[in-house]
Amino acid sequence: MDLVQAVVLAIVQGLSEFLPISSSGHLILIPHFLGWSDQGLAFDVAVHVGTLLALLAYFHRQLGTMATAWLDSVFRRVHTRDSRLAWQILVATVPVGLTGLLFADFIEANFRNPLFVAGTLTVFGILMYAADRFGHGTKDEFGLSWPQAIAIGCAQALALMPGTSRSGVTMTAGRALGLTRSAAARFSFLLAVPGIGAAGAYEGLKLVTSPEPVQWLPMLVGVAFAALSGIACIHFLIRFIERIGLLPFTVYRLILAGVIVWHFG
């Protein structure tokens, strides 16, 4: 992998991980369009680390408060809204973890093709618009009930299918369950922390046991550019969707799906 490919794919990952347009779908499509070879396991680990760093940097204050409150709930039996939210995030991560362990290899072998990506871009894009258009949410992320938090976690498991979008499907579920646009985005991003961390750790374990040689310079470039583009994207998205909504991303998804069908159909 050369440095140009590393920079482009890292920026794409940093943006599309948080925009509701599917990072996995774009990382499949761009090499197809540009004739690049597969980026390899080491680079996948690098961009996961980069996007995780973006989340930790942007939400460091809220995550620190939640972590302290969670520890107080465990060791001192002191329960607050921050400890409750932390527990909800952890429990809501279980569905995607179990689904990944059971079906990740099957999905990898059967669903990583452009026409499947076009289908999921379309279906979940329409659902995202419907939830945003007809959902009249008034709650912030602290107002979720336990069943609602777990339902969003189950929705996150669907994002293992390329083209779905982890942020898109969790924001769709959040809007459908009564969250405001910005609260749906914040809960989606907080829910991503353990999910992306676990995915990165899983791929890192595979990398350690793989004979694949590691190209350290592209890997470090991937971490840096994925982190920087991810921070910029989070900052932009929370403000953008509060004012504009999710319709522009639905339009983008439908246009991209049409291009894919035209090109690969």
Image (spheres, grey):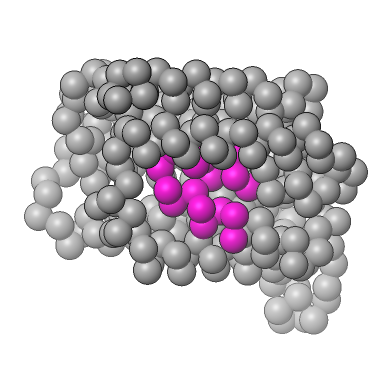
* Residue at 25% across, 52% down: 109
* Residue at 50% across, 61% down: 96
Whether residue 186 appears in magenta in the rendering, the answer is no
Across and down, in percent, residue 155 comes to 59, 55
Across and down, in percent, residue 204 comes to 30, 56
Q: Quadrant of the C terminus?
A: top left
Q: Is residue 96 left or right of residue 134?
A: left
Quarter holding residue 168:
top right
Q: Main secondary structure of the magenta part?
A: helix
Outermost residue to the right = 138
Using the image, determine if residue 180 lies above or below residue 253.
below
Q: Is residue 214 left or right of residue 194?
A: left
* Residue at 24% across, 45% down: 42
Q: Which residues are magenta?
A: 154-170
Q: Nearer the viewer, residue 102 or 17?
A: 102
Outermost residue to the front = 265
How many marks the image carries: the answer is 0
Whether residue 158 appears in magenta in the rendering, the answer is yes
Q: Quadrant of the N terminus?
A: top left
Using the image, determine if residue 232 lies above or below residue 82.
above
Across and down, in percent, residue 166 comes to 53, 45
* Residue at 37% across, 39% down: 116
Residue 8 visible? The answer is no
Residue 240 visible? The answer is yes
Using the image, determine if residue 74 lies above or below residue 164.
below
Across and down, in percent, residue 55 comes to 57, 42
